Image: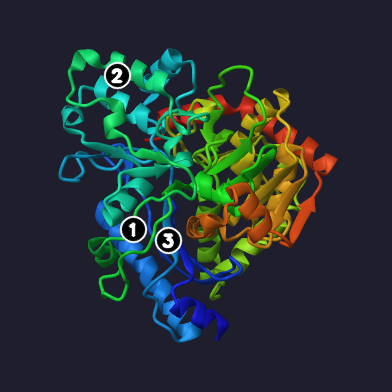
Amino acid sequence: MEIRDYIASGRACLGIELGSTRIKAVLIGAYHEPIASGDFGWENRLEDGVWTYHMSDVWNGLRGAYSALKADVYAKYGVKLSKMAAMGFSGMMHGYIALDAKGELLVPFRTWRNTITGEASEKLTARFGFNIPQRWSVSHLYQAILNGEEHVAGIDYLTTLAGYVHFKLTGERVLGVGEASGMFPIDSESCDYDAGMLASFDELVAEKHYPWKLRGILPRVLSAGEDAGCLTADGAALLDPTGELESGIPLAPPEGDAGTGMAATNAVAERTGNVSAGTSVFAMIVLEKPLSRVYPEIDMVTTPTGRPVAMVHCNNCTNEINAWAEVFRGFLEALGQKPDMNAVFTAMFSKAYEGEADAGALVLYNYLSGEPITGMDEGRPLLVRSPEAKLNFANFMRAQLYSALATLKIGLDILADEQVNVDRLLGHGGFFKTPEVGQRILAAAANSPVSVMTTAGEGGPWGMALLAAYRANRAEGQTLEDYLENKVFAGQAVTTLEPVQADVDGFNAFLAKYKAALPVEREAVAGVK
């Protein structure tokens, strides 16, 4: 009854995140706990060499996830969901959504997964003296300019997936600072785009005589808790065609999956960090001092309040594990069984920890797409083994889990050499759903204690709901760091595992073979079309 009244009175907060394979909605209650959820499965498409999602998929998916949430609310509490204290939308960071003056797409959405902007990335990094990864929006923009693409002159608004959804629902051209930091470098002192780099970019393209300056087509930058507009009547109808959703609901600044991951793990203060492991994997470490130099493997982004963050982002994580789960499902069905996929994944992860510490000397690449950290523009999933390597189920699965974190470890080793200090490293996302296994593998990769909270599987949608709650309650005067520490995570159960030296040594042995065999992966890319 207490939760039902809380929902009916419009005090609950909603977070919706558009992930790589799932759009999920999470509604939270008075104690910031998830009280209802809904989701919708979707997949990216490779069309004309570009990873994309159709905008019809975006809206069908959002409506599907929201409809499933409404059904869950009614089934559990017998009340219709029509109003909330606040809501917010997050999505896969980076990418390229270029809109004309009518708000229509000029070219298909280019997602973070694309590795087609190498020339632009390299030139902008050299010009700015700041690492500009291939997946960043400004890399996509400059590559389109270098390619001579005609649509560039018609850009009225350049944004990300989360920014696009927010714009359509509110009419506001804004982004949370963490999400904005994946479009263009941020000055943490001003919590805005770096003015010098903006001017440098405009000078770089001045000879093109475009009718825009870069700042004019980028979203306005907001910090967590700031007013990002309200749900319009048209926006409410877009999300809930039944007409039951009321307009006027305040929205939090739209964030990226990195920012929501930081919120979901209480890793927004200095010397805290988190690892989000799902379709992609990335580590976010909030810095107390700048790095000594620019590293192409390390992205500099920010927390939702603008603090500088070192980010190690890898395009590939659990896709290959998911693909093999389908193989095992088919095997079980061939034996006349009806497999429970949760049980399949649990068996896969649990058996991995029974494998040899070095995964039996197996070498495995999970590259469904390119991986910039190892210089791969494309990917080919690949298992390589010598005749002496020991191939069995346990070793195979351990190699799968090692492979999922191998490129992440390369970046984490750089931060370790930079003496970046982390008081706590928290894991979240699907990789950590099976108790202890993913946590132990990450501890081995990072050679550091790793903590997981009871909410580890909730991930970004819950983190976005927390940012929405902060938007609704910011009048209390707390910083986001204090709000999360004192209001959300006080008393939260945390499990911490120390690294086991045998696992650390085993991961290092796997990584040595992994690095040595990278030419094999390059040949696979060249030879397998």
Q: Position of residue 284 (x, y in %)?
A: 60, 39
Q: Amino acid at mark 1?
A: Cys
Which of discs 3 and 1 lies nearer the camera? The answer is 1
Residue at (52% x, 56% y) in the render:
475
* Circle 2: residue type: Asp
Quarter of the N terminus within the rendering: bottom right
Q: CA distance from mark 3 to mark 2?
A: 35 Å
Marks 3 and 2, the one that precedes in the sequence: 3
- Residue 50 at what x, y percent from top left? 31, 38
Residue 212 x/y as whole percent: 21, 26
The residue tagged 1 is 230
The residues bearing labels 3 and 1 have C-alpha atoms spaced at a distance of 9 Å
Mark positioned earlier in the residue sequence (3 or 1): 3
Q: Residue at x 58, y 49 (%)?
A: 480
Q: Nearer the viewer, residue 191 or 326?
A: 191
Front residue of 527/510: it is 510
Residue 170, placed above or below residue 183: below
Count of all numbered marks drawn on residues in the image: 3
